[in-house]
Each structure stands twice: as structure tokens, then as C-alpha cells.
Image (cartoon, rainbow, N blue to C red):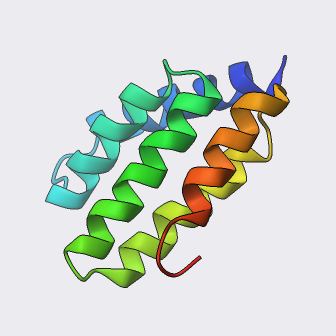
Amino acid sequence: MNDDRRLAVGLFDEVWALLETADRTPEQDERMIHAAHCSRLPDWIRAEAHEALARGHLVAGETGDATRHAEEARAIAATIEDQDDREVVLGDLATLPFE
């Protein structure tokens, strides 16, 4: 099983675990929705989505969340096989004010 498939399976399992949680918090609902979406996306789109979330959190003054999403984007970018796609993501991350 390749990394994308392994990640998709893990996210799918996480969604089901959250669906079966009786008293989900709003944060768990949000995580469940994002996990469901991410399980279906290629790595470069997922990395760019996290970069965009980091940028949005920075605008809102939420540096902790911004840092978390930037780190996730960077981790995903490291797995992107296509060099051009990887460089686009890393270039976008480099424009974040705290990068």
C-alpha cells in the first residue's frame, strides 16, 4: 500500500471513529469534516489547503493554529513526489510571515 492510500485509509478510519463518538465536540466535528475531505485529495492539494489555513489563521491572529497548519503543509510537501508541485507548495509556505 502506498503512502497516499495508507493516509486515506487512516483518515477514513478516523472519520468513522468520530462518527461513532456520542458527544462530539465542535472541534471533533471540524476534524471529522476535514479528515473526510482530505482522504480524497492528492498530496499537493492537501498541502496547499493547509498552507491556506495557516495564512487565514495568521490574518486572524491565531499563530498557534497557523503554525500547526504550516507544519502539516510542510510535512505533506515532503511526501510530494513531483518536484515542481513540491516546489510550488514550499514556495507558498516561504511567503508566510513567520516562515
Q: Nearer the viewer, residue 78 or 21?
A: 78
Q: Quadrant of residue 62?
A: bottom left
Q: Horizontal placement of 96 versus 84: left or right?
A: left
Toward the viewer: 59 or 69?
59
Query: Residue 95, image x and y in percent?
Result: 53, 64
Residue drawn at x 79%, y 47% is 78
**How far from the left and from the top, in percent, is residue 18?**
33, 41
User: Residue 37 location in percent, x, y?
Assistant: 38, 27
At horizontal 81% and vertical 25% (from top left) the residue drawn is 82
Quarter-of-image position of residue 85: top right
Q: Quadrant of the C terminus?
A: bottom right
Q: Is residue 56 above or below residue 6?
A: below
Q: In which image quadrant can residue 75 be found?
A: bottom right
In the image shown, does 82 or 65 lie closer to the viewer?
Answer: 82
Q: Residue at x 68, y 45 (%)?
A: 76
- Residue 76 shows in the view: yes
Asked whether, in this view, residue 57 is left or right of residue 77, the answer is left
